[in-house]
Amino acid sequence: MIPLNWYLLLGASLFLIGVIGFFVKHNIIALLLSVEIMLSAVNLTFVAFSSQRGEISGQVFVFFVLVVAAAEAAVGLALVIAIFRNRESLNVDRSNLLRW
Amino acid sequence: MIEFLFLFFAAIAVGAAVNVLAQKHVLYSALSLILMLTAMSALFVLLEAEFLAVINVIVYAGAIMVLFVFVIMLLNLPRDENGDRLRWLKFVGIPMGVFFLLLIGRTLWTAAGGEPAQPRITGSAAVIGSSLFTDYVLPFELTSLLILIALIGAVVFAKKDL
């Protein structure tokens, strides 16, 4: 059997990759993809703990994380479309004014 | 054998996640993320969460990522022009992130995992469904409200003139 530590370490690594991507990338869609990486890492941790403790609650929570991810992707991509229509660019450094 | 499978899929997941950040064009990032989610599903199978593995492929890799790819192709993006300012962020952020990972990894590695609970559970659709509709009914119903709000919000944001 694989120890719990391995899964937690993998989840932490993936989460860190997501965080680094969120701070380093310049493209709004790349930022959204980084958030998806982070959510996925959290899912893995949830399932690992669920399996370790013999409780199903962790897997039910992954379900809710999936729902939040879907809602976030829908609203985020709608915002991306709106921003691209106004600015012709998805670079976050260009979107530094509240009104233009 | 099972350790080998774990290491194999973990390597795929981490490699694909790094590739998401390394790619210049965001479309390749999205495709790489699909690979990462597939590896994640394999890890769910190793943890005996079969239903979530299936859902992860269908909903995450299937629906959400297709939405991403669809929007990327719809917008017909120019090549990623790197930002003029904040270029040095890369050289500060990555070392600090790796340092933080080493810190947290050391803690996780030395922490005693303990023996897994005995009887092992399998995350079949029946078990998850019965928990979802008894203990978690209220969050489940609120979820529908969240989806409705997201739906309306997406339409309002994306529409040209309301």
Image (cartoon, helix red, strand yellow):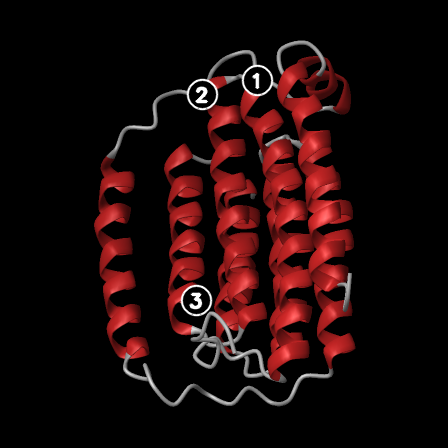
Q: For mark 3, what is the residue?
A: A21
Q: Give the quarter of the figure containing the N terminus of chain B.
A: top right
Residues at marks 3 and 1 on the same chain: no
- The label number, if any, that marks residue B116 in the structure image: 2
Q: CA distance from mark 3 to mark 1?
A: 36 Å
| Percent of width and height locating residue A2 | 47, 36
Q: Are marks 2 and 1 in contact (CB under 8 Å)?
A: yes
Residues at marks 2 and 1 on the same chain: yes
Where, by quadrant of the figure, is residue B107 drawn? top left
A68 lies left or right of A53 = right
Residue nearer the viewer, B2 or B146: B146
The residue depicted at 43 percent of the width and 75 percent of the height is A96
Residue nearer the viewer, A89 or A33: A89
Q: For mark 1, what is the residue?
A: B120
Q: Are marks 3 and 2 in contact (CB under 8 Å)?
A: no
The residue depicted at 63 percent of the width and 68 percent of the height is A80
Mark 3 falls on what kind of element? helix
